[in-house]
Amino acid sequence: MTLSADRTTGRLPDAFLRPGSSSFVDFLAEHAPDRLPGNRVMPAGVTDPASLSPHATTIVALTFDGGVLLAGDRRATAGPMIASRSIEKVFPADEYSAVGIAGSAGIGLELVRLFQLELEHYEKIEGSLLSLTGKANRLATMLRANLPMAMQGLAVVPLFAGYDLDKGTGRIFSYDATGGRYEEHEHHGVGSGSIFARGALKKLWRRGMDAEAAVHVAVEALYDAADDDSATGGPDTVRGIFPVVATVSVDGYQRIEDAEISRVAEQIVAQRRERGHLA
Amino acid sequence: MNMPFYVSPEQLMKDRADFARKGIARGRSVVVLAYDGGIAFATENPSRALHKISEIYDRIAFAAVGKYNEFENLRVAGVRYADMRGYSYDRSDVTARGLANAYAQTLGTVFITESKPLEVEIVVAEVGATPEDDQIYRLTYDGTVADEHGFVVMGGQAEQLGRKVKDGWRENMSLGEALRLAVAALGSGEGSSSRTIEAAQLEVAVLERDRPRRSFRRLARQVLADLLADGAKTSSGETSGDDLPPADELPVGTATPGTATADTVPPDTVPLDTTDTGDTGTASTGADTTGTGPEGPADASPTEEKPDERPEAPGGTPETDR
């Protein structure tokens, strides 16, 4: 299968010219299945496949008035070790949606790259955007293809958030490793520190918050997760590494500047200091 | 006694070329021209859904005239080619030159081997970091590639419209100026009759140099109407949520109409036969240029015929092809 190659004649391969689906993943599955991330065979005898790739940790999402926010800490772990202090796990999926990953980092990052391309490819071929539910379903399909890997310990658990242009609201979708898709309301979290982050979100989330308040809540939830979960990284003021926080609204995807996150993080630390050691 | 049925290769190629040209000439023209902030594409197309101008990749756009189903097929193939390449390597490894080569080989092969040539003419354009890095490739039904400078007109009355654009085009035009020139050219019909084309009848898109990542943008009707109005007052452009600066605020450099003659660069066209791309300096070899394919020698024949077919303009200037 020489797809992008066209080595012998230089012309576009017939597969490119054949009318077909608007999905890049379908196109790959049909004409170059070896390039799909899920189609790898794990060699026998690997006792602990999960140790092959670092583990990405906590992602939180919450809605606010006029949009949705997605945030993730910056740590990846390999067993008890910190594999990365500055990994980014929250990405724009397209102009009106964002995706964050927890679980096996290598596979997760590849999944995100393919998902971004999938949405862009559809948009270019069709000349219009997929509906938000359509995007969420595409991600579920792609995740389902990864099930064999997940069963061997290389699971990816994404969190998908986007602005629904038809309904005019932000929406959150969570997934399980089998490709199950669940719509979440108000707020949600995935990853190792999500138990603590969700606890914090439950207490801090308010109806009708604006984007600025939502950023504060997200950073505080991640702060709580980092406080109790060793695999979640807190704001690193020494190195200047802060959680990735992005909002999606009618104006599109927007990543909040590090300077702003730094300011919010300092505020939270100051509040906690005031409350006492155990806060 | 029956004579064996024989058609000389020259006649065969000429018939195919005439057939393709006739099909292309029926369509409405597309004007592609460089302006100071990128590359603009304009055509008369009342449809909002069936596009003749499309995005291929971050910095690359596609424009076509001719049979819709044929160029739509090529467009989709181009998007697949670009996305596949970008996915396999990196986004920066997708180039207009590579795509133009792939299109050229495809068109060339179909012209020689299929029962009918594709009745299309294509422009593949890539906006660079500076105006010097802009690339505009024009591909004809037989697989000929031309590396154009500044502007291209193709379709219906390409020759006539091309002359008009040639007279008015200069480097560093503002977007408003460029579009007014393009629309004026599109509206100039047979003879001296000219008409004004409404913004609603136009399909206009730009590759904007300063946009991060995906630089392709369609101009909404209102933005376009304001730009065409005369560029003096474009205040309502902001209402459509557009970040484009009004035409009169775009930096036009020193090239004001009065001094334009000094800056005017005659458009020079480098006609390239697809089989020669490996040898010419302008299109240096890469992974895509594999030299002469099996259909290579046959590919060359339609090009060699050109002086006979188009005696009106030797040298392959943009207005020669119809």
Image (tube, coloured by chain):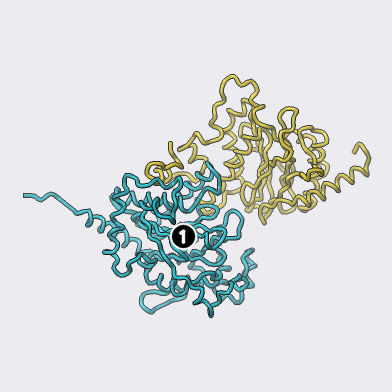
Chain colours: A yellow, B cyan
- On-image quarter of the N terminus of chain A: top left
Local crowd size for mark 1, using a 10 Å CA cut-off: few (<14), some (14–19), many (≥20) = many
| Residue type for callout 1 | Ile
Q: Please say if B185 is above or below B91.
A: below
Residue at screen point 61% across, 55% down: B212
Q: Position of residue A193 (x, y in %)?
A: 76, 35
Q: Position of residue B252 (x, y in %)?
A: 58, 72
Left or right of residue B225, residue B194 in this image: left
- Picture residue at 44% right of the left edge, 75% below the top: B167
Q: Residue furthest left?
A: B1
Which residue in the protein does label 1 denote?
B136
**Residue A223 showing in the rendered view:** yes
Check the residue under mark 1 and report the chain it is in: B
- Residue B184 is left or right of residue A152, and the answer is left
Which quadrant would the C terminus of chain A be assigned to in this image?
Answer: top right
Q: Nearer the viewer, residue B247 or B128?
A: B128
Q: Position of residue A38 (x, y in %)?
A: 56, 33
For residue B137, what is the image quadrant?
bottom left
In this view of the protein, which residue sits in the foreground, B158 or B66? B158
Q: How many marks?
A: 1
Residue A32 position within the rendered picture, expressed as x and y whole percent measured from the top left: 47, 37
Q: Residue at x 59, y 42 (%)?
A: A113
- Residue A218 can be seen in this image: no
Residue B91, placed above or below residue B52: above
Q: Is residue A47 left or right of residue B270?
A: right
